[in-house]
Amino acid sequence: MGLTNTPSDLLPGTLELLLLKTLVSGAKHGYGIVEHLRLTSDDVLRVGESALYPALQRLLFNGWVKGEWGTSENNRRARYYTLTAAGRKQLAAERAEFDRMIGAIQRVLGTT
Amino acid sequence: MKTLFHRLLHLLRWSRHGADLREEIETHRSLRQEALERDGLGADEAAHASRRAIGNVPLAIEDAREVWTLRALDHTRQDVRDAVRGLRKSPGFALVTIVTLALGIGANTALFSIFNSLIMRPLPVRDPGSLALLTDGSWSYPVWQEIGARADDLFDSAFTWADQSFDITQGGRPIPVDGAYVSGRFFDVLGVPASRGRMLTPADDTAAPPNGPVAVVSHRFWREHFGGADDVVGRQLTVLIQRQRFPFTVVGVMPPGFSGVAVGRTADVVLPFAAEPLLEGRDSALPETGQSWLEIMVRLKPGQTVEHANAQLRTVQSQIREAVLPGLRGNPAFAARYLTDPLTLVPAAAGASRLRRQYGTPLFAMVVAVGLVLLVACANIASLLLARALARRGELTVRLALGASRWRLARLLFLESLLVAMTGAGVGLLFAKWGSALLVRQLGNWERTVSLDLALDWRVLVFTATLACLCAITAGVAPMFALKSVTPGEALKSAGRAIAGDRRFAVRGALVVAQIAVSFVLVIAAGLFLRTFASLNQLPLGFVPEPLVLVDVNLFASGIPPAERGARLERLRNAAEVSGVRSVALSQRRLLTGGGWFTNNLVAVGDGPMLPEDRRQRVWRNATTPGWFDTMGIPLRAGRDFDDRDRVSSPPVAIVNEAFVRRYLSDGQPIGQTLRVNSDEGPRYEIVGVAADAVYTTPRDGMLPTMWVPLAQREPREWNSWRNVILTIKAAAGQRALIERNLATALTQADPTLVFRVGTFDEMLAATMAQERLVAMMSGFFGALALLLAGLGLYGIVVQAVNARRTEIGLRLALGAQPTGIVRLVFRRLGVLIVAGLALGLAGSWWAARFVAPLLYQIEARDPMTFSGTAAVLVGVGLLAAWVPARRAARLDPATVLREG
């Protein structure tokens, strides 16, 4: 069970992008986000708590997501995160930036 | 901005934030555990695995929280906590430093507040920088009329005012109120708007004002007298003169903070000059060319300098002076000088103040002195912090070894001193508030209330804050020096083995030398001022003040018609004879007011010529009833006292004092000679007696030529302009307090409408020396404080030196050194510091001496006695400070010390 991803494993800013994207489909708590990322990436992306929570705090701090307390599946208090309007805008911007970056990388790799 | 707000909001809910995160992560973990259990793991194993997977929770929380804070901010919080903890561990150190700083900062703020509000603070008016005051002294109304008529040509504008006390009625009783007469454009030129109603206008300052007699009142007076009523405009204010009531309509309230241009005196009721003839009737001073009672200020044109304005003024000076000359024709010598004496304007952004003239120099001296005290305090604190840092070397080194950055440690030390400085400044501010109020009370006396606006303004605040920060930095820098020389390797070695010689002592040594030098200067100053006060106190007064009680009767407010005054005053004199009274006498003037009634002009003896007036050698005058000399305890050297034979109808007589005889009658027998005063037309006074010398104005002025005439011979016409008469009452031994208690009742019974004040002569005597007493008191306090601080500093360094050299001293003792030798060893080192400090202090005092010279009396500013005495005191303090630790060192048990080492 290698749960070692830290932000440095990803391109800078990618974790935030993934988190924002994950929340598009609806409110999720931390564990839900992690599970969603794991399942949709076929077990490739495993985000550890030490990276997740500081990243979520950054999103909260910037006002891109909203946190609301609710009850988890096992009846514990959990914070559910939802995307804000500013978050959607940010997602679009980051996505564009990500595409530009990936395109650039592919072009570099494509040359011989 | 929003970001900062977010952060601050979060800091406020700090602990809540951490708990939330912890809970959130725990939920996360439990969900993972359940998932693992679903995958088939046992409960325990799942819990363990999920906990392991989650990693370092506190670190994750830390990281998550850090999003919200700046790292530095968080570290600072931690440093502050550490610093507080560090200080709480050594309460003695914290207490001494905080108290030292509080005294230093407090005394500075107190004095600076007074200095600021009395001397520096600009008037709260429009463009105070363009105001200028016509010097020197006061002016007559005709002079103002001449200048006022030309003001618009010469300057931008001009105005005049005269301080005046009014008696107004409140609930039927007359109460005295400080006020002023002002010219019509006073408020307009100053640019002071009304906070209610309107201010006075030129139309109000005419013989027939359109709205009748009007007045404006100060904001404070409005609150206190009218209870802050909204409908104050249009209300009546009744001024009482000679038992007549004059109603004035209040037309406006001055803005808060403005109470006239005379600093230290509040004008609560302001009337236009046109009201003066109304109130005074035939006694109006407005037409008098000889009565100088106005202050004149001008506002300069934009771009006009004071020099330029002076030049302008002097081109018309002769016209101004000529116009008011007719009243002075009888006196050609005086008139000639009057014409040529140049009119001079001086900048007056901070207003005008008699108080400032009296206290300006001493206050400045005290501000300097108190600044020096703060320097000593700072040196002491630096020294203390340095010693503390040295003592904490072990702890700091361990911190360094554990990976604290040097910068972080330096910051911790700096914060510690900043914390001390801030606390000290806070306590000091409280001390300042109390102290400055106390000082201002000292400036006032029984006939003058001093009101200074002591609200701490930004200048005082900046001043205090700068002082506190400077203290913190001075003190904070010193420990950093000490820290520099600590290397982690040295850390865990024992520090006790150091043998003599340590660079860090050099820093403290220099501080101690500076402390001694500054203390020396301060103690010298204290010595000089105390001796000045003592010599003034010991001056012969020429009369006996102890048994005397004075009653100052306000004839105007009492409403005694001039024709009845003789009889009414006689009745008062009888009424004052309560039990315990030896004798009662009346006089026109009271001694020791600092001023009085003098012949402005000339004196001639016999048929001789009029001697020209000498401003520095005025002839002072007084009028008394028979028995006054006996009551005052002034012996008659020759001739007789006044008696019942001296009446209006009998030939005018006079008594002169010995100083008068020395000056004007040095040849021949004074009794029987005749005098003319002021002009050749006046009466010829026959000298019937010679009184011993007595102080008339202030003890500092010494014995001045004085001439007395019988009160009974004062012409009724002259009674009109007399406002006050003084009842002097001599008490039998031990009866004074009793008389004071009964007197007021007895006088009110005899004359229910009487307005008067009762006081003892001692109180007045104290008031005449208020300035010297204040200076002596404060410099004594500061000198003692500096001495104490320097003593503490010395003690500290000796203790530290002895401790650092314990091993060496133990070794010496073990090798056979005598205890006296050890004491000598300690003293030798100290001696160098003391001698260096004294030499520096001596040089400083020698140089500074010329600045204090004007404040001294009968003592040289470089008085050898004071200098050598001070040196002896400082050496004494130094020896005392060194003696205790030196003795302790000499008594060390070598065996113990060597075993420790």
Image (spheres, rainbow, N blue to C red):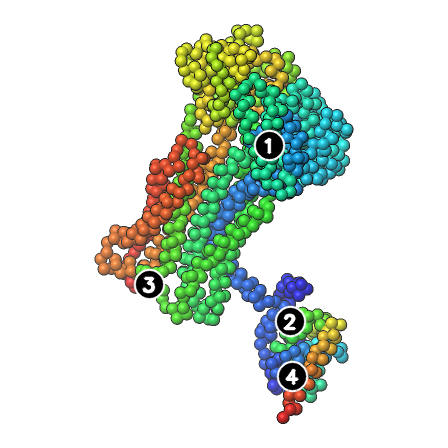
SS at circle 4: loop
Which of the numbered marks, if any, corresponds to residue B21? 2
Whole-percent x and y of residue B275? 69, 26
Q: Say whether marks 4 and 2 touch (CB < 8 Å).
A: no
Q: Residue at (34%, 44%) from the top-left corner?
A: B876
- Spatial separation of the CA atoms under disc 2 and disc 3: 52 Å
Name which quarter of the figure residue B203 lies in: top right
| Residue mark closest to the camera, 1 vs 4 | 1
What chain does mark 2 sit on?
A: B
Q: Earlier in the sequence, mark 2 or mark 1?
A: 2
Q: Is residue B250 visible?
A: no
The lab-note entry on whether marks 1 and 4 share a chain reads no
Residue beneath label 3, please? B498
Residue named by callout 4? A46
Q: Which residue is mark 1?
A: B315
Q: Nearer the viewer, residue B676 or A25?
A: B676
In x, y percent, where is residue B793? Answer: 40, 51
Disc 2 crowd rating (10 Å Cα; few below 14, some 14-19, many 20+) is many
- Helix, strand or loop at mark 2: helix
Tell me whether marks 4 and 2 sit on the same chain: no
- Amino acid of disc 3: Ala
SS for callout 1 = helix
Tell me whether marks 1 and 3 sit on the same chain: yes
In the image, what residue occupies the spot 61% across and 16% down? B719
Q: Residue at x 39, y 55 (%)?
A: B508
